[in-house]
Image (cartoon, grey):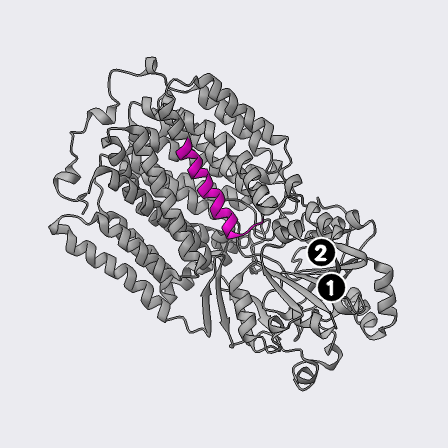
Amino acid sequence: MPNAAKIFMISALGLFLELMLIRWIGTEIRIFAYLQNTVLIVCFLGLGIGCFTCRKQASLRQILIPLLALTAILSIPQTRYVAAKITNLLSVMSDLLIWESALNAGVWTTIYRVSLGLALTLSLMALLWEVFVPIGRILGRAIDSHDNVIQAYSINVLGSLVGICLFVLLSSYWFPPIVWVASAAVMAACFLGSSSNRKLEVALLVALVGVVWIGDKSQPVQELAWSPYQKLEMTDQIPSHSVWAGKQLIKVNNAEYQGIIDLDPERAAQNPAIPKELLGASQYDIPLLLHPQPSNVLMVGAGSGNDVAGALRGGADQVTAVEIDPAIIEMGRRHHPEHPYDSPKVRVVNDDARSFFATTAERYDLIVFGLLDSHTTTAMTNARLDHYVYTRESIRRTKSLLKDGGVMVLSFEALKPFIADRIGSCLEDEFGERPLAFRIPTNPTGWGGVMFVAGDLKRVDACLAENPRIQTLIRQWQQASPVVIAGTTAIATDDWPYLYLESPKIPSLYFLLGALIVALLFYAKYRIGDEVMIGGWRRSEWHFALLGAAFLLLEVQNISKASVVLGNTWQVNAVVISGILCMILLANLVASRFPRLPLAWVGGCLVSSCLVLYYIDLSSFAFLPYPAKALLVGGLTTIPLLFSGIIFARSFKLAESKHRALGANLLGSIAGGMLQSLTFIFGIKALLLLVGALYAIALWCAPSASQRSDQPAADDRQHPEESPAEEEGELVAV
C-alpha cells in the first residue's frame, strides 16, 4: 500500500474505532455515557504514545487482540452484565446523578464498592489503550516517511473526516454494533500482515464479527433499535417489582426509561390494575385539566406518545409533538394502543426541544414538557442531551411562545431536592410568581415525578375549583411529598447548564477518574518504558502539546455553542466536528500557499479571535433562518481554528521529529479533556479565556528554523530506516 493510502486508511480506522467505542462503551456501561471524555482521553493517550514509540513493533494482531477482548465484554451477556455493574458500584458518588440507585452501605462497604468499580474501569481503560497504541505507531511511522509533511497531515485529517462521516452515516440509519464492527474489520483488513501472520489475523477478524453476532442473537427482547442517540429495547416483560399497568416497557441504555400505556377511558376502566381514583387523572391527563379546551398544544419530549394521547383525550384541537429520538417515535407510532401519532390533529416533529423553541413562529395555549431526563451526554461535552432545555434562557423563550392566558406544565423526576428547587426557582423568576408544584407518586398509570405549573395561574385555579376531584388529589400529593422551592440553588443557564450538579464544583468522580489516568500512565511506562514520560520533552514538544490542549477545549466550546443555537441533535454535533476538520484542511492549504505569512500576525489574530468570541452571545442569532444562523455560528466559532491550524502546519513542517510532534499534540489533548471539567466551576464561556492563554503560551514555545538542531532526536538516532517490525513482515499493508 502506498504511504499516502496508509496514512488515510489508518486515520479513518482510528477515528471510526474511537467513535464506535465511545458510543458502545457508554451504552453498555452507562456511567461512561455521562463521562464520555474518559474514553476519549484514553484513545488519545494510546494514539499519542503510539506516535512517540512508532519505531517499536506494530501489527494488526496487536490491534485485534485487545479489540476482540473489548468486543467480547460488550457483546456476551455474562461479561456485559458484569461490566454494567460498574455503574452501580460507582453510583455511591452521589454528587453526580447518574440515574442509578446506590445501595445504602457503611464506610468500608462503600470503599470496597468504589475500589472494585475503579479496578474494573482501569482494566477496561488498559484494554482500550492497547487498541490505540499500535494505531498510533502505524500513523506516526507513515507520516514520518512521507516527503511532504503538510500533505501527510492533510491526508491524516481527511482520513479522520471519512472515519467520522462513515460512523455518523451508519448511526443515522440505526445500524447496530454488528455493522459497526464489520465495517471496522473491512478497514482493518487493509493492514493484514505477511503470510506467516495473515491466517491468525484473518481468524481474529472473523472472531471479532462472530462474537458480536452471537451477542446480538442472545438478546431476548421484543424489539431492539440503535438510534443515533442511544440503545432502545422494548419488552413486554414488566419487572415483578413494577406497579406499571401498561403492557410494554422501553429501556434506554439498559435502564428502564418509559412505558407505553393504554389509558383510553373505556379500556382503562376495565383494567383491574388501575385504581378508580386515577381514571382520567393520570400525569398525562392532568395538563389538559388545567387549561380548558386548548386549541393549540405543544408537547416537548413526546416520547412514545403517552403525553400526546392524553392531550387528545383532553380535547386538544391541534398538538405539535416534538421528540429528539426518531426510534422512540417509531416505537410509539407502531405500538401505542391509542395510536396518537396517527391522529390528523397531531404534527410530529423530530427535533431537539431547544432547537424547536428557537425556530417556531407559532404560539400555544398549553406547553407541556414530558419527562426529558437524559441518559447520555452530547458529543465531547459535559452537558447531557436535556441540559439546555432547562436553562433560564430556554424557559424565557418558552414563556414567549405562550398565548395570553397560556399555561406551561413541566414534569421532571427530581431525584434530589435541589433539582426541584432549581427548576421551580427558574420558573418563579421568569414568570414572576411561584409555580404550582406537586409530586405525583409512582402509580399504575405513570412513573410520576414533580409537576410544575406556571403561566396564567388564575386560569389554573379556576379550572381546579371546577374539578374538586383533581384539586383534592393534588392537595393529597402536596401533603404526602411537599416540594420545597427555597430559591437557594443556582439556576441553570446556557453558560452553566449543569442541571444535575448541586453547586459549581468538580464532581468527586472526575478526580477519581483522573487518578485512573495517572495509573494508566504508569501502566504505559511498565509496558513501554520511560520514553513516553514527559520529563524528557523539549520546548517544541510542549508547543505541540499546548496546541492540542487548546484545540480540544475550543472544539468543546464550539459544540456547546452550536447546541444552544442550532439544537442538540446528532446531526449538529456531526456537522460541527466535520466543519472543524474541514477548517484544518483549509488552514493547511493556506500554510502551503503562503509559507511566509508572518506567524506573529497569525498568533495575534488567534488569541484576539478567542477573546472576541468570549464577548459575543451567539444565542442572539437564534431567530435567524436555520441556514443563515448555521453559517454564521459555524463561521464565527471556527475562525480561531483557521489561525491555530496555520500555526500547527507551519510548526509541524519545522519539527525535528514528526512522530514526536504529533504524539505530543495528541497527549496535550488529554490535558484539554481533563481541563474541560473546569466548566463545572467557571462555566462554558470561560473556556475561551483558557484557550486564549494556552495558545499564547504555545506561541511562546513555537519552534523556528533557527531553533532546529542539526542532531536528530534521540529516538530518531537509534532506529534504522526500517524497523524490526517491518523486517519481520508484521506491518505489511495490502
Q: Position of residue 384 (x, y in %)?
A: 56, 50
Direction from residue 573 to residue 244 in the image, left or right: right
Mark 1 and mark 2 in contact? Answer it, CB < 8 Å. yes
- Say above or below: 233 vs 59: below
Query: Quick one: SS at disc 2?
Result: loop
Residue at image position (60%, 33%) is: 686
Q: How many marks?
A: 2
The residue under label 2 is 362
Direction from residue 478 to residue 720 in the image, left or right: left
Residue at image position (38%, 22%) is: 594
Does residue 89 appear anywhere in the picture?
Answer: yes
> What residue span does the magenta drawing correspond to?
567-586
Direction from residue 582 to residue 481 in the image, left or right: right
Residue 568 covered by magenta stretch: yes
Q: Residues within 10 Å of mark 1 (few under 14, many from 20)?
A: some
Please name whichever residue, 368 or 38, is drawn nearer the observer in this view of the structure.
368
Residue at image position (19%, 50%) is: 192
- Say above or below: 688 vs 295: above
Does residue 21 appear anywhere in the picture?
Answer: no
- Say above or below: 276 vs 560: below
Q: Quadrant of the N terminus?
A: top left
